[in-house]
Image (cartoon, rainbow, N blue to C red):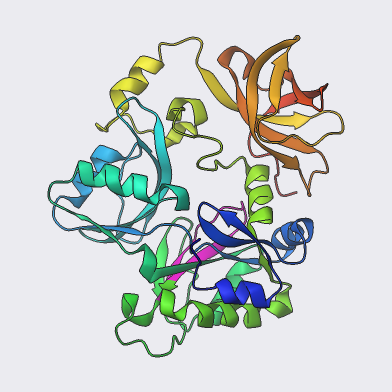
Amino acid sequence: MLATPLHDSHVALGARMIEFAGWDMPVFYSGINEEHLAVRKAAGLFDVSHMGDLVIRGKGSKELLQKLLTNSIEDIPVGKGVYSHILNDEGMIIDDTIVYRTDLEDYLMVPNASKVKDVLQWFRSHDPADHVVDISDQVACLAVQGPKAIDIVRRVSRVPIDNIKRFHFGLIDADVPAPDGLLWNGKVMAARTGYTGEDGMELLIDSKRAVWLWDRVLAEGTVDGLVPVGLGARDTLRLEMGYLLSGTDFDGRQSSLQTGPEWVVKWEHHFIGKRALLEQKKQEALSRLVCLELLEKGIPRHGYRIGFEGKDVGAVTGGTFSPCLHKGIAMGYAPTSLAKEGTVLDVMIRDKAVPARVVRAPFYRKG
């Protein structure tokens, strides 16, 4: 089993460790609900170093990405990121990813942990010029998320960070020791992105300095109520926002038309899978990912069946009892005809049909 550079730090903090996508990762430290609410009210610190890091560089790198991404990077400036899907020839999602433009002809792409090899193989099969370099082993990533996250990162950084807008990044100087030979000359790549619905930053740093940065952020954030957060709360937080989880909400059998969001596909450029998507548009029976809010007590889980008028119409891909809304919420697939907001479906929980209303994402909204 693989381990991130912060593995020993998690164990020292008493984390409950589990296997996730081949990695030994913390699922919680103090408790999932407690960590979830800390992120919503103050701040949380996540180790997301299991995610991949692929550099696409050199002349022709933009053209390669344009061909393999559903979203367009044609006009994004240096310092900006774009969320996109990667499709196969049949229009099915291989993975979702964020791509950052780091220089005029250089990009950094962050695939999901379980999909790094698949994405790397797919890109290289369409890249005779060999633009792609896997630097995943050299990079650690810490996510600081929550209403107080920016204040905490501001204190860690020696330079101003307020000019880093949502889905942009900057290189910040955080007094990283012994910078010689480190990625980004020892600086931290701070991206204003995240997976919780809260403001915050994902801090990418040379893996040899991951422990130092983890300890520094924990020390700075304790006064604000920051706590370390495991995969358990990371999942409940993303579910409250209706964010996709690779391998769960899509597993190679769904297209961007089924999962959304609509803006992830830019039809003005050619990309692999576009022709298949155009054909799918004509299919009336295409199932779609819906958000479901339970109307009675119950906790929906992955694989639970979704019904309508006594008939099986789909399945839950992810569900939980929302710590903020105090009710069961779920995502799952249902026919397009039943995906309209307000439609009442059933989720089968222990042989009981629990009514659930189709709602628009996100489930959780501040205020």
Position in image of residue 111 (x %, y %):
41, 51
The answer to whether residue 114 is magenta is no
Position in image of residue 272 (x %, y %):
27, 32
Position in image of residue 184 (x %, y %):
33, 75
Q: Which quadrant of the structure image shows residue 305?
A: top right
Q: Seen from this angle, which residue lies furthest front?
A: 1
Q: Which residues are magenta?
A: 188-204
Q: Residue drawn 37% across and 57% down?
A: 80
Nearest the camera: 345 or 350? 350
Q: Which quadrant of the structure image shows residue 56?
A: bottom left
Q: Is residue 308 left or right of residue 205?
A: right
The answer to whether residue 198 is magenta is yes
Nearest the camera: 58 or 267? 58
Q: Is residue 332 visible?
A: yes
Q: Residue drawn 52% across and 59% down?
A: 23
Q: Residue drawn 43% across and 89% down?
A: 177
The image shows residue 292, relative to residue 146, as above or below, that is above
The image shows residue 333, relative to residue 24, as above or below, that is above
Q: Is residue 74 visible?
A: no
Q: Which quadrant of the structure image shows residue 13?
A: bottom right
Q: Residue drawn 37% across and 81% down?
A: 186
Total count of labels: 0
Q: Is residue 172 left or right of residue 105?
A: right
The image shows residue 339, relative to residue 38, as above or below, that is above
Q: Seen from this angle, which residue lies furthest bottom?
A: 178
Position in image of residue 271 (x %, y %):
27, 33
